[in-house]
Amino acid sequence: MEERYLVAGSIFNALQYEYLVGASTVRKIVENTCEKVWSRLQPLYMPDKSEDDWFNISEGFYNTTNCQIASAQ
């Protein structure tokens, strides 16, 4: 069920009737699955940023054309 929601983009109502379960059951299953996927993948692909990380990211944006035009005005 959760694969149909995540991969195919099925809506909760469609899943509810397809699997003959209640809307709250669909919501709980999808919510639990998403929480587990997030808890496993977030540290690997979206780690928390330190202050130095954010500074380095901002330096990369500062050197773009839009920022140079804005700072020249």
Image (cartoon, grey):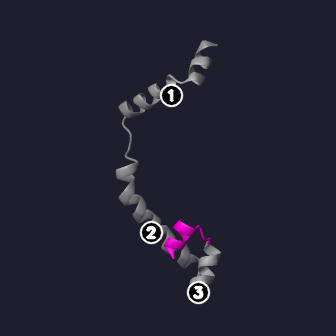
- Inspect the image, locate mark 3, and give the three-letter code of the amino acid beneath it: Leu
- Inspect the image, locate mark 1, and give the three-letter code of the amino acid beneath it: Phe
Of tags 2 and 1, which is closer to the observer?
Answer: 1
Secondary structure under tag 1 reads helix
Mark 1 vs 3: CB contact within 8 A: no
Residue 42, above or below 10: above
Q: CA distance from mark 1 to mark 3?
A: 50 Å
Badge 3: few (under 14), some or many (20 or more) residues near its Cα, within 10 Å?
Answer: few
Q: Give the extent of the magenta segment.
A: 1-11
**Which disc number belongs to residue 29?**
none
The number of numbered badges drawn on the structure is: 3
Q: CA distance from mark 2 to mark 3?
A: 19 Å
**Which disc number belongs to residue 61?**
1
Q: Which of marks 1 and 2 precedes in the sequence?
A: 2
Secondary structure under tag 3 reads loop
Q: Which of marks 3 and 2 precedes in the sequence?
A: 3
Residue 36, image x, y percentages:
40, 65
Q: Is residue 22 left or right of residue 47?
A: right
> Residue visible at 57% across and 69% down?
8
Q: CA distance from mark 2 to mark 1?
A: 35 Å
Residue with the most extreme top position: 72
Mark 2 vs 1: CB contact within 8 A: no
**Occupied quadrant, residue 65:** top right
Of tags 1 and 3, which is closer to the observer?
Answer: 1
- The chief SS type of the magenta part is helix
Residue 67, image x, y percentages:
57, 22
> Residue visible at 38% across and 44% down?
48
Q: Which of marks 3 and 1 precedes in the sequence?
A: 3
Residue 35, above or below 64: below
Q: Which residue lies under the disc numbered 2? A: 33
